[in-house]
Image (spheres, helix red, strand yellow):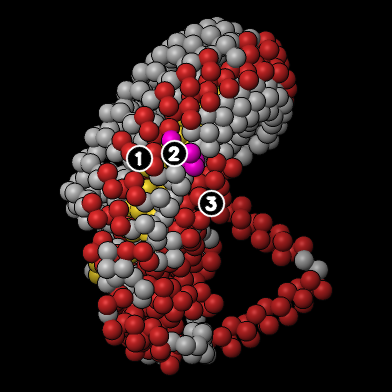
Amino acid sequence: MNKIVHLIFLLITSINITAQKKSYSLEKALQNPESVESLDLSSQNLTKLPNSIGKLVNLKNLILSRNHLTKLPETIANLKDLKSLTLDQNKLIELPKNIGYLKSLEYLSAEENQLYKLPKSIGDLEALTMLIVSKNNLTELPESFGNLKKLKFLDVKNCKIKKLPKSIGNCTSLEYFNALKNELKVLPESFSNLKHLERLVLTSNQLIKLPKKIGSLTMLNKLELRKNQITELPESFYNLPKIEEFDLTDNKIHIISKNIGNLKSLKSIQLQSNPLTKLPEEIGDLSNLELLWLNKNKLTSLPVSIGKLSNLEKLSAGYMNLKSVPNTITKLQNLKSLKLDKNQLTSLPLAIGDMKKLKNLNVKSNMLTSIPASLGNLKLSSLDIRENLITELPQSVIDMGCFDVHKDKHVYYPSRAELIKKDRERIQNKIKKEETDQSTKEKDNIAELEKIRLQKIKEQEKFRLYHNVLTDELRIKGKELSKLEPFKSNTKYNKIINSLHDKIDRYSVSKHITSLNYIMYISEIPNNYKTKYYLSDREINDFKNISHLSAHALADSYISAKNYQKAIEYLKLALVKFPYHSYSGTTVNKDRLRIRTDLAEIYYEIKNKNDAYLYVLANIINGESFRNHEKILIDYLKGEDKVQFKKDLNAAINTIKIKANKEYEITFRSKKYTFYDGPYKKSLANMKTILLSIKLE
């Protein structure tokens, strides 16, 4: 599948790179038609494309997405050099009959239109590599389809196709075929000729069988057949040499052949919602299997050989009639998730605690009377034992420390607050032990390293810059942004951006205060940017971060200058109005934690202690390491009446209100504060539990 994604990327980027001269206006393009290689007319409310489009004889890339076109002019056939044609989200009923004249066309996408058929001439597109016509009203593909010898990627999902032409077997270069949500009942036997097919998606059709020679698809890697009416698999299916994943969920499969053991490359099997009554022992020969989902079948037992699946990570066998599970299951040393809910189990293997990597166990709705004590040897992330006959848990399980345990009310398990308290005690004891175990030499080395670290921090405090190297990205990305509208037309923006010749670092930020302040406010990205300029999510984030990096850099500069009121102003801008954007929730959270830490330090420095306390408390709620922030709070509370502080904190806890957009309010000592608890959103109960468990000694 990575190869297919790589193919798409290479094809589209090569077309874009080749298209040196790009235009976003047909009127401007026609002023010098022979010089235009790329034309993007997307989202311009076009209802008709003029015949003059045919004058752009050197055009290689044409984008007409998100308009109201009902047809294309015949003159489009004049575009002999056209390599890419994108027609998504229009109202096209048909494509031009002479589209076959586009002999150089490699990429054609007409997704989400009203096409009811494809012209016969589509088979003349001899260079076509990718064809996307999903979300249309197509009922069939023309017989000429078989002439597309170079076609590698075909997407016809969400149409109404009832049958495929026999000639499709001639598309021997095809690597990816997606016909999800159509009305196919059978595949032509010629389908078995697609020797290079790697991924086949036929989910949600009406298939009753597969081609007898499907085993001839020697490159097939992933097969998706969910929601069909297949009753059995042909014998050749078990000869697919490279198959790694197959999904036959929600079919009518009643038997799996013992030859399944031949599929040595299999990593994922999904067989949920079938009438299977038995699995062959040969399934244990699938040594590479990582996922096995069997929910909602009619199995009463699992094969003993299941214990041989040494790489299995996820096993789901719920909603069946299992009366027991084989003891061999405990040999699954890589299993992370085990779901056995809604069966008739009366016991679990005593050695279940030997499955050292098990993190999630669900045995809800069985007939269990007890849980093996060995389960306490594990570090589970979640455990569900509801709706059984269990009256109590072994002490080892109670002491396990799992935070996500679902149980019946009469079964005792420590509350979240108790678990947090124990966890903190465990960490503190571990730290004390580590400190006790350190030799004198180790302590001296640590002290020396700490001295060097503090000296370095002191040096950097003179010229603070949290984002350090990353800050210069605001200059680089700002120049990229200046080439796009509306920034391209903003003379002042361009003048300021182009004046930033040198790298922005901790030593030069203070020289650019006026420029950065302007860039911070003016660089907000319009909502339509992603679709207008075909930008990736990462590119959008980079542009959005121009404002954040400016605000944060200015805040650091004011902190270095001890201009605390200005520092507070810009830290709050960086925290709320211009937050940091990233795919990584951890990175975003670290940024928030740092800003709130700086705000707390400043408020403490200017004797506004209540505000300082609240920003530290916000970090304790949202922080990855509660210990560091709790230590800061304890330091701030020196000389404070801690008993009174605890009373005021308890009163504040009862005022917490969760609002929309990841906000929450808390009132402390008669002042209301609003914080943004993202990206790791906590529940109200969790917030209260965390704050109640703070130890001030």
CA neighbours of label 2 inside 10 A, class few (<14), some (14 to 19), many (20+):
many
Q: Which residues are magenta?
A: 124-130
Amino acid identity at mark 1? Ile
**SS for callout 2:** loop
Q: Are marks 1 and 2 in contact (CB under 8 Å)?
A: yes
Query: As drawn, is 424 to the left or to the right of 644?
Result: right
Queried whether the magenta region covers residue 126, the answer comes back as yes
Residue topped by disc 2 = 125
Q: CA distance from mark 3 to mark 2?
A: 20 Å
When asked about the image quadrant of residue 469, the answer is bottom right
Residue topped by disc 3 = 10
The spot of residue 592 in percent (x, y) is: 42, 67
Q: Is residue 157 above or below residue 453?
A: above
Q: Which mark is residue 99?
A: 1
When asked about the image quadrant of residue 179, the answer is top left
Q: Are marks 1 and 3 in contact (CB under 8 Å)?
A: no
**SS for callout 3:** helix
Q: CA distance from mark 1 to mark 2?
A: 8 Å
Query: As drawn, is 73 to the left or to the right of 188?
Result: left
Q: Residue at x 65, y 56 (%)?
A: 429
